[in-house]
Amino acid sequence: MGGLYWQLVCQIAGVAEPWDAAGYWTLWYPVSLLLSGIAGWLRKSHGWYAGALLTFAQLPILWMKNDTDVLWPVALLFLGLLAVPATAISALAGWFTDRA
């Protein structure tokens, strides 16, 4: 799902990477968080890792689309930071679903 998200954002926004899109923080990142919540809800008690998995699943697409190795540490750090709220949301969604 992370790879599909990456491709969809790039196609719609006409950018090479989702965070290059003008509306990334107001539209595309919230969509990613929503997908993390849905994935957490579906995984229930194991939902805590869905947000991180969804976020880091974008890494192979990044690797395939870019030829340079120079920005790998930056990309990993950025994806790690983006994964924190996504993981929290998926964990909460899974926790609430498991309790219901």
Image (tube, rainbow, N blue to C red):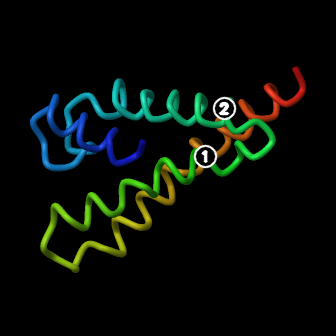
**Foreground: 46 or 16?**
46
Three-letter code, disc 1: Ala
Rendered residue at 34%/65% (across/down)? 75
Residue 100 image position (x, y, % from top left): 87, 20
Three-letter code, disc 2: Leu
Tell me the element at label 2.
helix
- Which of discs 1 and 2 lies nearer the camera? The answer is 2
Up-down relation of residue 69 to residue 26 (above or below): below
Residue 41 image position (x, y, % from top left): 68, 30
Circle 2 sits on which residue? 42
Tell me the element at label 1.
helix
Up-down relation of residue 69 to residue 51 (above or below): below
Name which quarter of the figure residue 89 lies in. top right
Relative side of 11 to 44, left or right:
left
Residue 96 image position (x, y, % from top left): 81, 26
Q: Which mark is residue 50?
A: 1
Q: Residue furthest top?
A: 100
